[in-house]
Image (cartoon, helix red, strand yellow):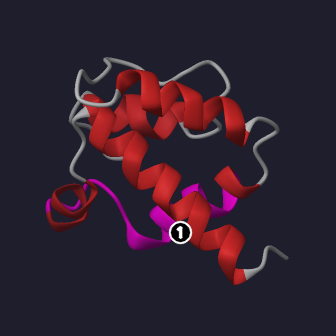
């Protein structure tokens, strides 16, 4: 199981990815489009990423300019794509 520091780091990556994509995770939860358990699973899935450094670089490159889709290595791409479309993840 991932340690607390790893989980916090990947929770930050998930939050930053959402922000970069223009997805307000808190709003999606309140709208009923995202279960808190699904969000937790997304963070845990992120901890298994083979390229978190690549994710960091991608996020830095898109900081302030945003993006319309996740990078290819994102393990949560389908969740984000669904939320971008305004559907339930």
Task: Judge by depth and name the residue closer to the eye, 14 or 35.
Answer: 14
Q: Position of residue 64 (x, y in %)?
A: 23, 29
- Secondary structure of the residue carrying numbered label 1: helix
- At horizontal 28% and vertical 43% (from top left) the residue drawn is 19
| Quarter location, residue 34 | bottom left
Q: Seen in the image, is 30 located left or right of residue 3? A: left
- How busy is the neighbourhood of tag 1: few (under 14 within 10 Å), some, or many (20 plus)? few
Residue furthest bottom as drawn: 4
User: The N terminus lies in which quarter of the figure?
Assistant: bottom right
| Residue 61 part of the magenta-drawn span | no
Q: In this view, does 85 lie to the left or right of 27?
A: right
Q: Quadrant of residue 52?
A: top right
Q: Which residue is pictured at 39% across the width and 47% down the height?
A: 16
72 or 82, which lies in front? Answer: 72
Q: What's the residue at 48%, 51% (across, down)?
A: 14
Q: What residue is drawn where x is 68% and y is 82%? A: 4
**Which percent across, then down, holds residue 72?**
62, 18
Residue 12 on image: x %, y %? 47, 59
Q: Is residue 53 left or right of residue 58?
A: right
Q: Which region is colored magenta?
A: 31-45
Does 38 lie within the magenta span?
Answer: yes
In the rendered structure, the answer to whether residue 80 lies left or right of residue 51 reads left
**Magenta stretch, main secondary structure class:** helix
Count up the numbered dots.
1
The correct choice, above or below, for 68 with respect to 2 in the image is: above
Q: Which of 88 and 2 is in front in this view?
A: 2
Residue 49's place in the image compared with 45, above or below, is: above
Report x, y in % for residue 33: 26, 53
| Tag 1 residue | 40
């Amino acid at each position: 199981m991932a340690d607390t520091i790893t989980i916090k780091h990947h929770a930050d990556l998930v939050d930053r990815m959402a922000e970069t994509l223009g997805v307000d995770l808190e709003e999606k939860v309140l709208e009923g489009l995202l279960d808190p358990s699904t969000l937790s699973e997304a963070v845990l899935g992120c901890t298994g990423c083979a390229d978190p450094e690549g994710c960091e670089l991608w996020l830095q490159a898109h900081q302030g300019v945003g993006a319309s889709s996740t990078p290819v290595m994102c393990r949560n791409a389908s969740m984000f794509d669904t939320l971008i479309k305004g559907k339930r993840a």
